[in-house]
Image: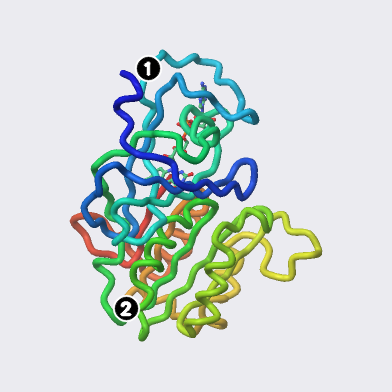
Amino acid sequence: MDSSIYNATVIGKILLTPDLMILRIKTDEPRNEFIAGQYTTIGLLSNEERSANSVVTIEPISDNLLIKRHYSIASAKHEVSEFEFYISQVKSGQLTPRLFNLTQGRRMWIDTKIQGLFHLNQVPPNCDIVMIATGTGLAPYMSFLRSHLQEHRTSKLAVVHGAAYPWDLGYYSELRFIEKNFDNFYYFPTLLKADSTWSGLTGYIEKHLDDNILQNQAKIEINPNKTHFFLCGNPKMIESVTNYLNKFNFTIHRNEQCGSLHIEEY
Ligand SMILES: Cc1cc2nc3c(=O)[nH]c(=O)nc-3n(C[C@H](O)[C@H](O)[C@H](O)COP(=O)(O)OP(=O)(O)OC[C@H]3O[C@@H](n4cnc5c(N)ncnc54)[C@H](O)[C@@H]3O)c2cc1C
């Protein structure tokens, strides 16, 4: 396999930290319109260089192998030639250190298939929507908001985003901007390792749910008939928030079974 299989070009790379980036790529051919919240697969050949701050893996990977991984699309559903991804570097991983070494103009591979069931299609029009993420689990919600914010004027929307440091809060300015301009949108960033310069929420997402932050600050009911919850990111957060929601009789949304709790695990 050689680089002739590459079918996209890097058109933007914003390094938020050495291990967190927003990557924009342009495909040679447009894709079909997708559903906000879905993911696609991107890849690089194994002979591409790794980033300088990565950790060389113990197991070598054979030459000319296309390393592929899934990534949620952060851009709006109608953007079918330019795609945005929110990616954290796994220093010992195979693909992300190579992605972090990319620069503008470099070529890469992206699948033609866009898939996934993590979307708003089954949410009844008047239900409130709570989007909970750790780290890059925010990506599908950026696509939700960029695609559907204008249609959801009568229901409430809330993003609860957990991260370590303030600089790990990707899309902070965009979310604050939405909050300022849409009175039905609520943004709750919470940090685990904040210092005294941070005046916002601190600690685990679960603590704020237990403190009734959604009910008190957004007047959102924890009721499966009135609110749909989306959870994306760290498996531990997903497990504990699922346990919390089980107490309110939420059931998980699956292909064959409608529920008010939607889960995407990375
Ligand atoms: C539906 C879906 C959507 C996703 N969306 C996103 C997204 O929007 N943003 C995002 O950042 N991620 C996302 N992911 C995760 C992503 O697909 C990758 O799993 C992640 O980026 C790590 O890829 P990698 O190749 O760098 O690491 P991998 O090589 O896959 O390594 C993963 C793990 O294995 C360990 N490991 C690696 N090499 C070795 C070795 N030689 N020996 C022992 N252990 C090793 C690593 O430390 C790490 O813990 C998504 C996943 C799914 C399933």
Whole-percent x, y for residue 215 in the image: 51, 81
Identity, as a three-letter code, of the amino acid under mark 2: Glu
What kind of element bears circle 1? Answer: loop
Whole-percent x, y for residue 148 in the image: 34, 71
Question: Which corner quadrant holds the N terminus?
Answer: top left
- Residue labelled with disc 1: 64
* Residue that appears at 33% across and 20% down: 2
Q: Is residue 219 above or below residue 159?
A: below
Q: Is residue 191 left or right of residue 233?
A: right
* Picture quadrant of residue 111: top left
In this rendering, the count of numbered labels is 2
Tell me the distance, in whole angstroms, between the alpha carbons under discs 1 and 2: 46 Å
* Residue that appears at 53% across and 69% down: 175
* Picture quadrant of residue 250: bottom left
What kind of element bears circle 2? Answer: helix
Q: Is residue 264 left or right of residue 134?
A: left
* Residue that appears at 58% across and 64% down: 172
* Residue that appears at 66% across and 55% down: 167
Identity, as a three-letter code, of the amino acid under mark 1: Asn
State if disc 2 and disc 1 touch (CB < 8 Å): no
- Residue labelled with disc 2: 151
How crowded pointer 2 is (Cα within 10 Å; few <14, some 14-19, many 20+) is rated as few
